[in-house]
Amino acid sequence: MLSSLLRTAVGPALSTSMTTASATTTSATTTSATTATSLLAPPRHGIPATPPPPLLCAPSRVPLRSNASRMAALDVPALQSTSCAVIASPAMATTISVPTSSQQNGRIIIGNSEAFQAKLEAIVQGGPQSLQVISDFDMTLTRFLYNGKRGASSHGIIEHSHMLEEAYHEATHNLFSTYYPMEVDPTLTQAEKIPHMVAWWESAHELLIKHRMNKKLIPEMVRGANIGFRERTNELFDLLHASNIPLLIFSAGIGNVIKEALAIKARLHPNMHVISNFMEFDAEGYTSGFAGKTIHVYNKQDVVVKDSPVHKSIADRHNVILLGDSLGDLQMSRGVDVDNILTIGFLNDKVAERLESYKQAFDVVILGDGSVDLVYNLISMIISGECDEALLHASA
Ligand SMILES: [Mg+2]
């Protein structure tokens, strides 16, 4: 069990030093602000078992939420800055709630703690050389809300730029009005929606050709866009790069814009591979077409990694951490020969409606535009080869 490897010190602030964390003793520990807790289990690797301490944790305590209606009622005021809570029961959801270092009220829900622990343990044991990270882009790496408004998607960066002819912007707005209601129409099956999605994407791409989208506009469009990355994304990118762990970014957006957004507003390291719709340009830089098969919202799973040029770099990496903000993103690993996969879902909107389905589908659900702290900490554990419960608890 992972739990035997987990340290039990719980601190109110994120520890960014795995070295320090690894040096922690293995007995239950109490910090100044919090009391240790344990998800913990029998000894392993010479580490003595820790008797389960009482559930937590001053000064505030998160109530146990054990059913859908309670889980849906998570929009509570931000926790006090020194609070932390872990409530663990094998049969019930484990909620790890900690304060964030930003204004966002980040929240992490692990629906099945035993399954989570088993997967994490297996992936940690596999080490960084067995790991690849697969992520969606829009509203997964980027924020759902930014500057108090909806964050821009990669398509939206162009559409909202007003740097092309007004007729382009009117036409894209009309496409949205036509097709978005179909995308979210609960009376249509996915199979019924797909032809409409293909028509939407292809029409949108044709508009970029017709209205002479030039590649030299992309940097300015990105700089002017309301797009921001989740807190600690740059540190996550740097960590993956430093450890030579591939990051595959799958998107039904526009790859050229995504790469520019990463380069200008975050990081674009050589280990980061964007698999998306890429504009092709003529000699003057105007869009002349799109490379390859159109990737739309319902066919990411058909753009299998083994057909991608990056396949070679990930062929021997059979452990996956997958990040997405829609249920469809879970299909991004299709085609990858996976031994262990840990899935993390960012639930940004309509939380009450969708929480139960996300909790069922993802190993971890992060609410409310939360940071990538947890992802960073999981990667840190995999790199160090040791699981550290303090880092789990400190994830905001
Ligand atoms: Mg997305």
Image (cartoon, helix red, strand yellow):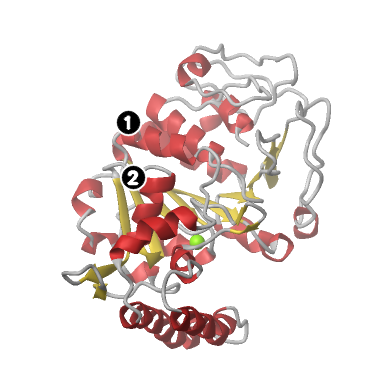
Q: Position of residue 225 (x, y in %)?
A: 50, 58
Q: Which residue is mark 2?
A: 268
* Residue 356 in view here: yes
**Compared to 152, does 382 lie above or below?**
above
- Location of the C terminus by quadrant is top right
The reply, left or right, for residue 251 in relation to residue 177 is left
* Residue 258 in view here: no
Please state which amino acid type lies under the numbered disc 1. Answer: Ala
What residue is at 51 percent from the left and 31 percent from the top?
A: 2
The reply, left or right, for residue 149 in relation to residue 175 is right
Please state which amino acid type lies under the numbered disc 2. Answer: Leu
Q: Badges 1 and 2: C-beta atoms under 8 Å apart? A: no
Q: Which residue is mark 1?
A: 242
> How many marks can you see?
2
Q: Quadrant of residue 165?
A: bottom left
Q: Position of residue 331 (x, y in %)?
A: 42, 64
